[in-house]
Image (cartoon, rainbow, N blue to C red):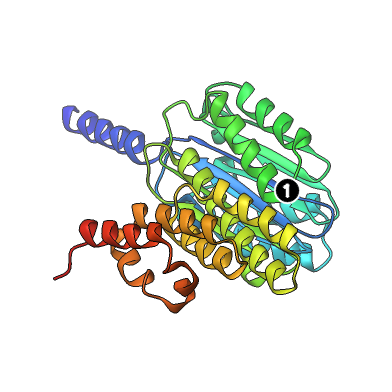
Amino acid sequence: MRIARRIASAFALSAALFAAPAGATYSIVACDGQGNCGAAVATHNLAVGASVIHARAKVGALATQFETNPNYGPKGLDLLAGGATAKDALQRLLDEDGGFEGGTIGERQVGLVDAGGHAAVYTGRDAQDSAWAGARAGEGYAVQGNGLASAQVLDAMERAYRRGRGELSERLMAALRAGQAAGGQRIGGLSAALRVATLEGGFQDIDLRVDGSADPVADLSRLHDQFRAHQAILAAQRAARRGDLVAARAQRSQALRLSHQWDRIWRSAARLTVAMGDRDRALEYLGVFAGINPVWARSEIDDDIYAPLRADPAFSRLRERIAENSPGD
């Protein structure tokens, strides 16, 4: 009898250890009405961007969380692309769940939006039991979470997204930051991700991931700023080539503001500015670049693009400073 009880206790312990997910995720999926669709997510697990959020331009976006079924992403988007409504696509996913990793639909939490602005959400019974859990859906977006500090997390996300301005990625990040500020996950966070599928595609698409961090939302926000900085410096270069120096300067300022001291952006700004004929400012930017990355600056300063600066004593002093801070082999 004692042996039977011990076996039963062992099975109970095993179930407690392996069958109880530590839910702690919040996400937003949205389409902007023009065909750009995306999602942002934060969780207490590694590499959330690898499986939880999915998006396709002119089709929709989806988040599958708590106990993620990664098949939901591509299958859900295919259903939407084939003409299914968000509600019908979600129901098909649940009906055909397939018991991934031994789970059931009681362990699924899903948010789904189509490019037409229709949204659907689902929180299974087991997911609902992770205090706090819930979802919201509105025109063009859905927010969902489990293991949250309170209902205020989703309230804040919804408010931030609806009031947001700018491109879709900016509104998604505003929602994610608002959720974090409202308390985020009850047990803390570890990873975060942002994905936006754009009409233009290619390098305009965004797929940024913080796979493990003590402050993943802040780190993702920095990466998003740097992505925008890179886009802005490219726009500045295009404007300069067509002779629109006013637009070039505005885009350059935007790039530097968002750079978070990314050396590549300051180098590009220095090269662009000397080409535009603003020698003093080019020297200033080159100096900042050298302060961030003196090793790279040692070879950069000898580039012929800086020939117009070489007669300036300040350029000679900068060269000496770079040599001091980056000694040769």
Q: Is residue 156 left or right of residue 87?
A: left
Element on which disc 1 rests? strand
Mark 1: few/some/many CA within 10 Å (<14, 14-19, 20+) = many
Quarter of the image with the C terminus in it: bottom left
Residue at 79% x, 49% y is 87
Q: Residue furthest left?
A: 329
- Residue 88 screen position, x and y as percent: 80, 54
Q: Quadrant of residue 202?
A: bottom right
Q: Is residue 298 left or right of residue 66?
A: left
- Dot 1 amino acid type: Ala
Residue at 48% x, 55% y is 285
Q: State the residue position of label 1.
A: 30
Q: Quadrant of residue 137?
A: top right
- Residue 83 screen position, x and y as percent: 84, 65
Residue 100 in view of the camera: no
259 or 195: nearer the viewer: 259
Residue at 65% x, 36% y is 175
